[in-house]
Image (cartoon, helix red, strand yellow):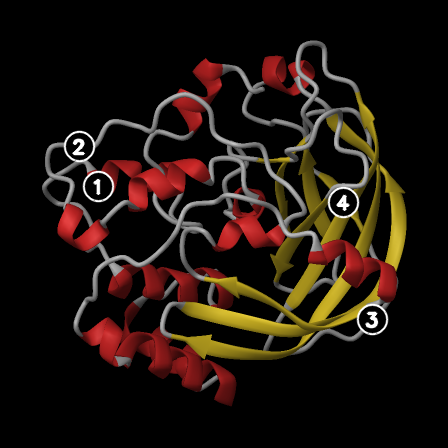
Amino acid sequence: MIAPDARELVYPGMIGPFITAHSVTDRNTSARRPRGFVWSRIRIVQEIYFPAGLSGITSLAAIFFKNRFSQTLLLTILFSPVAASAQAYEGSACQEGNSEIRALLKDGQRSGMTLHLGITGDAQNWSTSFLKAEGKPPARMPDYDVELDGDMDIHDWTCMFAAFRAFDKNQETAWAEGVKGPGIGEVLIVKLEDSAKPIKIRPGFALSDALFQANNRPERIRVYAISPSRSDATQMGLLYSDWKVLTQKEFKLQDRNAWQTIQLPAHKVSETRGGFIAIEILSVYKGSKYDDTLISEVMN
């Protein structure tokens, strides 16, 4: 398990795979940002395709006409009937990992395998396992809108250590494998801007040096560049289908609470779908207190 005080500090009512701890205060004030699908969809488009942010009409126009796929995605997500009517939250809890990932890495391809990116609950499918939340869900704020947000806060709590925490641009959150023992052979899938470029990884629980030492850290990892054959915009995000392995390489990480850089062999990355990698744990640096292996952040 992870230290309970760390859970309370890092995950107090986080909402959605891309709205992390730094956004919590927005929900707890009268001037908070809009909620529901309309806001979450805008954040999904911004975080995945426009990480530099949307500043003004000029920037939006330039981004909008960047390529045909971005045009279709933005129109589908922002102006679909569901978004227009601000339909109530329809996410789900994180329950189990995705064993199909192992078949993809073993066979080199997996026709019919799909990964959705957009709402709470999707995170459970982006890793072979994840550490389940313990204790009680966070208490709801007095102004929590149940009609609009449903059980989003509870569902998000169940995804406390699920895959999206490793690419939420917050190094104080983390993915933790969820099997008995150190998690040798467990796999995490991460979406990147470009898997052919240098990749930065923050192994272990980076929140503090004490938690970093208390929990396992990956030592040797095998990293695969993977790619879906197609991607489709849905009413709640993006659906990636029919996966294949492009290349792979083993790395040995240093046992330090800091960013480390790795580079995969050259491969072609889709300009519209972006890059994806799968990280397999081969060995670990043992924690002094807990037998859970974590990865805090992966990005480029």
* First reached walking from the N terminus: tag 3 or tag 2: 2
Marks 4 and 2, Cα distance to the nearest angstrom?
40 Å
User: Looking at numbered disc 4 in the image, what kind of residue is underneath it?
Assistant: Thr
* First reached walking from the N terminus: tag 3 or tag 1: 1
Choose mark 4 or mark 2, whichever is in front: 2
Q: Nearer the viewer, residue 38 or 200?
A: 38
Q: Position of residue 157 (x, y in %)?
A: 39, 36
According to the picture, the residue beneath numbered tag 3 turns out to be 267
Q: Are marks 1 and 2 in contact (CB under 8 Å)?
A: yes
Q: Residues within 10 Å of mark 3 (few under 14, many from 20)?
A: few
Q: Secondary structure at mark 4?
A: strand
Question: Which of the 4 image quarters holds residue 258?
Answer: top right
According to the picture, the residue beneath numbered tag 2 turns out to be 141
Q: Are marks 4 and 2 in contact (CB under 8 Å)?
A: no
* First reached walking from the N terminus: tag 4 or tag 2: 2
User: Looking at numbered disc 1 in the image, what kind of residue is underneath it?
Assistant: Arg
Query: Is residue 71 left or right of 96 when viewed as pictured?
Result: left
According to the picture, the residue beneath numbered tag 1 turns out to be 27
Q: In the rendered structure, find residue 93 and report the number of the disc placed on it.
A: none
Q: Secondary structure at mark 3?
A: loop
Marks 4 and 3, Cα distance to the nearest angstrom?
17 Å
Choose mark 4 or mark 3, whichever is in front: 3
